[in-house]
C-alpha cells in the first residue's frame, strides 16, 4: 500500500488475467489482509509478454526480484501454479487517481 500511495509503485503484474484489464480502465486497489479499498487508478498502458523476456525498463515501477528464479517462485506461490519463463505476464501501468 505505501508504495502505491507514494507513487513509487506505478505498475502491477497479472498472470492469468481474468478481468481483461485494458488501457483506459479504472482499477481499485484493495488491502489483501483487510479487504479495504485504499486507492483508485487509471490504466495508462498494458503490455503482455513472457516472464523470461521482460526488459529492464518494463520492471520500473514494480517490485524488483533478485533473480528470475525468485520471480518465478514468488508468482508460483501466489498463484499456486507452475510458473516459468514462458508464462505470460500482463504488465499494467497506472496513474493514481485518489487514495484513502
Image (cartoon, rainbow, N blue to C red):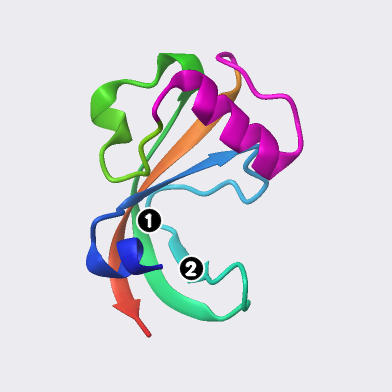
- Relative placement, left or right, of 70 versus 65 is right
The residue tagged 2 is: 29
Q: What stretch is highlighted in magenta?
A: 66-86
The location of residue 53, given as percent across then percent down, is: 42, 14
Asked if residue 91 lies left or right of residue 56, the reply is right
| Quadrant (top left/top right/bottom left/bottom right) for the N terminus | bottom left
Most foreground residue, 21 or 38: 38
73 inside magenta stretch:
yes
Whether 16 is drawn above or below 30: the answer is: above
**Gap between marks 2 and 1, in whole Å?**
16 Å
Q: Where is residue 92 in the image (x, y as percent from the top left)?
A: 41, 45
Query: Is residue 31 inside the magenta stretch?
Result: no
Residue 52 in percent (x, y) is at 47, 15
Q: Where is residue 85 in the image (x, y as percent from the top left)?
A: 55, 14
Which label belongs to residue 24?
1
Neighbour tally class for label 2: few under 14, some 14-19, many 20 plus, Cα within 10 Å: some
Considering only order in the chain, which callout, 1 or 2, is on the residue closer to the N terminus? 1
Q: Which of 60 and 64 is in front in this view?
A: 64
- Residue at position x 24%, y 67% in the image: 6
Q: Do the residues labelled 2 and 1 touch (CB within 8 Å)?
A: no
Say what secondary structure mark 1 lies in. loop
Q: In the figure, 81 relative to 38: above or below?
A: above
Amino acid at each position: 500500500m505505501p508504495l502505491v500511495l507514494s507513487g513509487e509503485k506505478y505498475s502491477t503484474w497479472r498472470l492469468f488475467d481474468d478481468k481483461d484489464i485494458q488501457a483506459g480502465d479504472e482499477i481499485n486497489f484493495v488491502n489483501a489482509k483487510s479487504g479495504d479499498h485504499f486507492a483508485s487508478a487509471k490504466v495508462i498502458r498494458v503490455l503482455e509478454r513472457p516472464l523470461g523476456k521482460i526488459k529492464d525498463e518494463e520492471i520500473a515501477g514494480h517490485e524488483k526480484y533478485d533473480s528470475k528464479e525468485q520471480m518465478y517462485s514468488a508468482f508460483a506461490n501466489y498463484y499456486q501454479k507452475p510458473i516459468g519463463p514462458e508464462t505470460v505476464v500482463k504488465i499494467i501501468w497506472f496513474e493514481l487517481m485518489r487514495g484513502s
